[in-house]
């Protein structure tokens, strides 16, 4: 039995006594490192530089759901739908039948910046029959996604690329309010929410650490240069209420998607 302790509501209780229902990430090695998967009904932020595997990791989560009869929604704010579908097919997922059977809804939006006298206004525009009313503010976007989640009883929701939402939200106080509200509304339906955020490659860029506080869990993806080659790593930075592996986990991306190796030690 686990001897690890966890502070819950002012009381210290063994981790083993906490009932945290888990939901598979769709990546076996990551589930092992998390002691069973993400926590159902909570949010996870996947952060990393470009090409580190954020989108593919989020697709594993969605298609694992599809295979278990758990409906999903993918809200993408940085890739168009044709490209997403082509990439998913390439990795072996039958995205077309998932969308046709409404097991998966894909919503792709682009950020529009409209100059105003007092500055700029940020809105999201969608090319989807569900979004007749255009363009949308953050509040309306959140309502529309929630409506779709209720219609399809979605249990897994991915927002791929929260950068544009941060733009939409404006200053940091608004960011807190809007994104918190969005996540809270989605997880109130007992849906598990996965967000991705692209970190800039410039070390110490102002925006880099900002969104970390908004999610219950954070996983950071990196590409490390070691022994003459780049190695992909994922690190569970935080996962509230969960006892998890701390060290970076090596992983690979192949034509079958992501395979993670929690037992393998990184080369020195
Ligand atoms: N079939 C494949 N085989 C090997 N690597 C692949 C394959 N498909 C994609 N990749 C790798 O995955 C990367 C893209 O992953 P993605 O999840 O889109 O990154 P991110 O969303 O973090 O920008 C590509 O740059 C490539 O290195
Ligand atoms: Mg991506």
Image: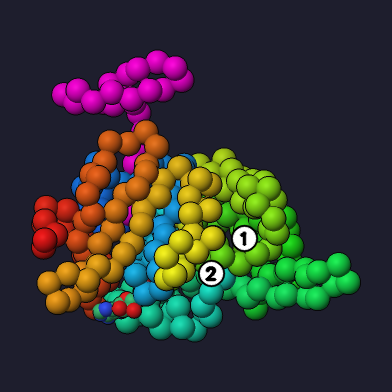
SS state under label 2: strand
Where residue 234 appears, as percent x and y from the top left, is 28, 58
Q: Residue 80: where, in percent of width, then height?
A: 53, 80
Of 3 and 224, nearer the camera is 224
Up/down of 267 relative to 32, above or below: below
Magenta region:
1-25
Residue furthest to the front in view is 204
Left or right side of 113 for 104: left
**Residue 47 at x, y = what percent?**
42, 60
- Residue, x 41% and y 57% (percent of image)? 46
Q: Which mark is residue 76?
A: 2
Residue visible at 32% across and 36% down in the picture: 242
**Quadrant hosting residue 233:** bottom left
Q: Which element carries disc 1, helix, strand or loop?
A: helix
| The N terminus - image quarter | top left
Image-quadrant location for residue 14: top left
């Amino acid at each position: 039995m686990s001897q690890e302790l966890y502070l819950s509501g002012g009381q210290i209780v063994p981790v083993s006594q906490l009932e945290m229902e888990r939901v598979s990430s769709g990546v076996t090695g990551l589930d092992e490192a998390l002691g069973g998967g993400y926590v159902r009904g909570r949010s996870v932020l996947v952060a990393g530089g470009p090409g580190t595997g954020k989108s593919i990791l989020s697709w594993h989560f969605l298609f694992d759901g599809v295979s278990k009869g758990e409906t999903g929604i993918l809200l993408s704010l940085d890739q168009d739908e044709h490209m997403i579908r082509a990439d998913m097919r390439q990795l072996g997922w039958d995205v077309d039948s998932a969308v046709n059977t409404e097991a998966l809804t894909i919503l792709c939006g682009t950020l529009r910046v409209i100059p105003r006298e007092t500055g700029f206004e940020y809105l999201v525009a969608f090319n989807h029959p569900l979004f007749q009313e255009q363009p949308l503010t953050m509040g309306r976007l959140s309502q529309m996604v929630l409506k779709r989640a209720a219609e399809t009883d979605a249990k897994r929701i991915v927002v791929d690329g929260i950068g544009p939402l941060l733009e939409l939200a404006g200053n940091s106080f608004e960011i807190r309010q809007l994104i918190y509200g969005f996540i809270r509304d989605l997880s109130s339906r007992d849906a598990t929410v996965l967000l991705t955020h692209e970190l800039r490659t410039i070390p110490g860029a102002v925006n880099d650490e900002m969104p970390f506080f908004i999610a219950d869990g954070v996983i950071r993806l990196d590409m490390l240069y070691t022994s003459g080659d780049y190695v992909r790593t994922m690190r569970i930075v935080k996962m509230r209420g969960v006892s998890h592996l701390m060290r970076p986990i090596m992983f690979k991306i192949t034509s079958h998607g992501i395979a993670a190796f929690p037992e393998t030690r990184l080369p020195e």
